Image (tube, helix red, strand yellow):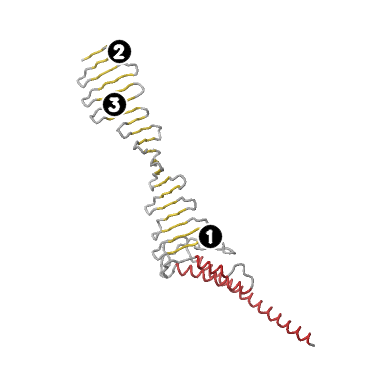
């Protein structure tokens, strides 16, 4: 009957579609195996972070192979009908990962994790640009940017909060705190220098000594044993509460809690004590002492 004929045709179509679907599933499994094996060989072939790579390898070619493999697996999965990502997303993935002026020639291979990582749904963690000069720029998902110069030694990291960290070729590390507008520089010798927005500078030496340079050019030293010394722009020096003033005419004046002393270029020393007593020692050896009222109580020649 017509119903039997129609039923037979529909059953044959169902059988044919089922067979085709099984064949596509088989192809997908084989493709996935080949892709996994290929990626595993690429990753296993990389040694831990070395500057040089075997001749004939190209960072451009390596990364492009990864993109092509991702595109291929998406197309296969989409054909079978089990796609979790759209083909348009893959196109956007290829577009996002830009190789600017890249050249396919033997060069150093960075053995760090692949420059682009994705999960189901293409949740990108980072993108990378490789320039013909060898310079690399990596953009992270949170807005942080890492720039690596061709020498591999100069690195600049601009964080999402505005902070900037620079690693120089001479091994200096410069960190700029955006909120505080303060720069912290660390030298290979261990010296640390802090520069504040008001132009005050602090130097922390490896031996524990701290040097503070104020905006008015006053310099203060703090020593590990507790001693302090301040040098003022006019030449005044204060050590542990003892103030020393150097005058342009060669005279020197020392102030302490016990006395004030004036030293003259010819060797004469005049001292006024806290109780008012005055003592003068001349270069000739003469000594004269006065009481607090100014009366001479001793005059020894």
Q: Quadrant of the N terminus?
A: bottom right
Earlier sequence position, callout 1 versus callout 2: 1
Label 2 to label 3: alpha-carbon separation: 22 Å
Earlier sequence position, callout 2 versus callout 3: 3
Q: Secondary structure at mark 2?
A: loop
Q: Which residue position is annotated with label 1?
A: 125
State the image quarter where residue 133 is shown: bottom left
Figure disc tally: 3
Closer to the camera in the image, 145 or 173: 145
Q: Is residue 122 left or right of residue 185?
A: right
Q: Secondary structure at mark 1?
A: loop
Label 1 to label 2: alpha-carbon separation: 85 Å
Q: Position of residue 233 (x, y in %)?
A: 31, 35
For this orientation, the residue located farthest to the left is 284
- x 31%, y 22%: residue: 260
* Dot 3 crowding, Cα within 10 Å, few <14, some 14–19, many 20+: some
Q: Secondary structure at mark 3?
A: strand
- x 47%, y 66%: residue: 98
Q: Which residue position is annotated with label 2?
A: 293
Q: Is residue 125 above or below residue 15?
A: above
Q: Quadrant of the C terminus?
A: top left
State the image quarter where residue 121 is shown: bottom right
Q: Position of residue 153 (x, y in %)?
A: 40, 56
Q: Nearer the viewer, mark 1 or mark 2?
A: 2
The label number, if any, that marks residue 139 in the structure image? none
Q: Which residue position is annotated with label 3?
A: 253
Is label 2 in contact with label 3 (beta carbons under 8 Å)?
no
* Dot 2 crowding, Cα within 10 Å, few <14, some 14–19, many 20+: few
């Amino acid at each position: 009957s017509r119903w039997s004929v129609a039923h037979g045709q529909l059953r044959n179509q169902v059988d044919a579609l089922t067979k085709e679907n099984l064949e596509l599933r088989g192809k997908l499994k084989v493709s996935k195996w080949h892709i996994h094996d290929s990626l595993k060989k690429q990753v296993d072939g990389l040694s831990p972070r070395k500057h040089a790579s075997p001749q004939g390898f190209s960072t451009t070619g390596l990364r492009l192979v990864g993109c092509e493999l991702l595109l291929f697996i998406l197309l296969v999965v989409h054909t079978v009908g089990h796609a979790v990502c759209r083909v348009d997303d893959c196109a956007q993935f290829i577009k996002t990962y830009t190789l600017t002026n890249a050249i396919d020639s033997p060069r150093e291979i960075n053995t760090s994790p692949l420059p682009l990582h994705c999960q189901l749904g293409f949740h990108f963690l980072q993108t990378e640009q490789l320039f013909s000069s060898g310079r690399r720029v990596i953009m992270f998902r949170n807005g942080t940017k890492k720039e690596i110069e061709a020498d591999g030694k100069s690195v600049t990291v601009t964080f999402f909060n505005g902070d900037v960290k620079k690693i120089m070729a001479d091994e200096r590390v410069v960190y700029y705190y955006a909120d505080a507008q303060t720069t912290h520089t660390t030298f290979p010798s261990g010296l640390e220098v802090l520069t504040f927005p008001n132009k005050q500078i602090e130097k922390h030496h490896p031996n524990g000594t701290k040097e503070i340079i104020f905006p008015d050019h006053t310099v203060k030293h703090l020593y590990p044993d507790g001693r302090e010394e301040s040098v003022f722009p006019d030449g005044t020096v204060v050590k542990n509460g003892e103030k020393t003033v150097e005058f342009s005419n060669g005279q020197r004046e020392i102030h302490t809690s016990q006395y004030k002393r004036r030293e003259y270029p010819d060797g004469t020393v005049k001292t006024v004590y806290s109780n008012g007593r005055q003592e003068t020692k001349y270069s000739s050896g003469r000594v004269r002492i006065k009481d607090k009222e100014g009366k001479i109580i001793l005059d020894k020649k």
